[in-house]
Amino acid sequence: MKHTVTTFQKAKDEGKKISMLTAYDYSTASLMDAAGIHGILVGDSLGNVILGYEDTISVTMEDMIHHGAAVARGAKNALVVVDMPFMSYQTSVYDAVVNAGRLMKEGRANAVKLEGGQSVAPQIQAICQAGIPVMGHLGLTPQSIHAFGGHKVQGRDEAAARKLLEDAKAIEAAGVFAVVLECVPAELARRVTKELSVPTIGIGAGADCDGQILVYQDMLGLFSDFTPKFVKRFAELGTAMQAAFQAYMEEVEQGAFPAKEHSYGIAKEVIEKLY
């Protein structure tokens, strides 16, 4: 069954949890889809885990379109959400609608995601009016990492908590179909989840959100440059991959690979005729 914004809303209404992961390529998206993951986010986190940047600021529209289209080709049932990169929507309502349209047409997205609260409500409303589903993102918004002064939990004091709740209501009113809550105290995330009619998707926001999302390289142990507290490693594939690479290198150096079973044959008489 193809997951859509409607099935996400139905899951919240019925009290069923929503599972999401990030992906950036066809083969990974295909595996997640086969596993039954409900939604795949082509996150601008690709700047960190794929392109090797220190942050997400340098990610371009072309990056998101390229990786979004690859994921869309692999995800037959999962809802594919593609991030709007830094400065693709902050500059104007017009730019926001045009760039969201590009992610849908060229990046083959089912929906787009953008960061921010009341300040981007006009962009959200305009994108939704253009018939494009929008997922919101509050709390620790990586595109604003320099303004936050680093990776810090958001909404811990009364003023910040109140603003986050107000922002959540503002973007819901603007038309988002779901809201990502990142690095938000669990009790605050529970309150936001209770007060919103649309689903919340948590990442470092406790167990009471309507769904959860993780960067797949984090949860598989493939990325170790920085590991947030909220990450649980469900496998240590990075260690296994490194061991396999080393075993391959050793067999090549020793002449053990490729063996006869990995090679192609040719008739002896053909070879003899070459001399």
Image (tube, rainbow, N blue to C red):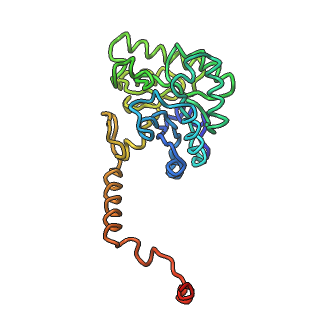
Q: Looking at this rendering, what residue extends furthest in the top direction?
A: 159
Tally of numbered tags:
0
Above or below 110: residue 129: above
Above or below 76: residue 44: above
Q: Looking at this rendering, what residue extends furthest in the right direction?
A: 130
Nearest the eye: 91 or 119: 91
Q: Tell me where residue 134 appears, x and y as whole percent.
A: 58, 27
Relative to 50, 154 lies left or right: left
Q: Tell me where residue 113 appears, x and y as whole percent.
A: 54, 29
The quadrant holding residue 143 is: top left
Nearest the eye: 58 or 184: 58
Nearest the eye: 53 or 238: 53
Residue drawn at x 32%, y 36% as measured from the top left: 226
Nearest the eye: 195 or 261: 261
Above or below 76: residue 117: above
Residue drawn at x 43%, y 16% as measured from the top left: 164
The quadrant holding residue 139 is: top left
Residue drawn at x 38%, y 15% as measured from the top left: 161
Above or below 87: residue 166: above
Q: Tell me where residue 152 appears, x and y as whole percent.
A: 33, 23
Q: Tell me where residue 23 appears, x and y as whole percent.
A: 49, 42
Residue drawn at x 59%, y 46% as measured from the top left: 77
The quadrant holding residue 54 is: top left
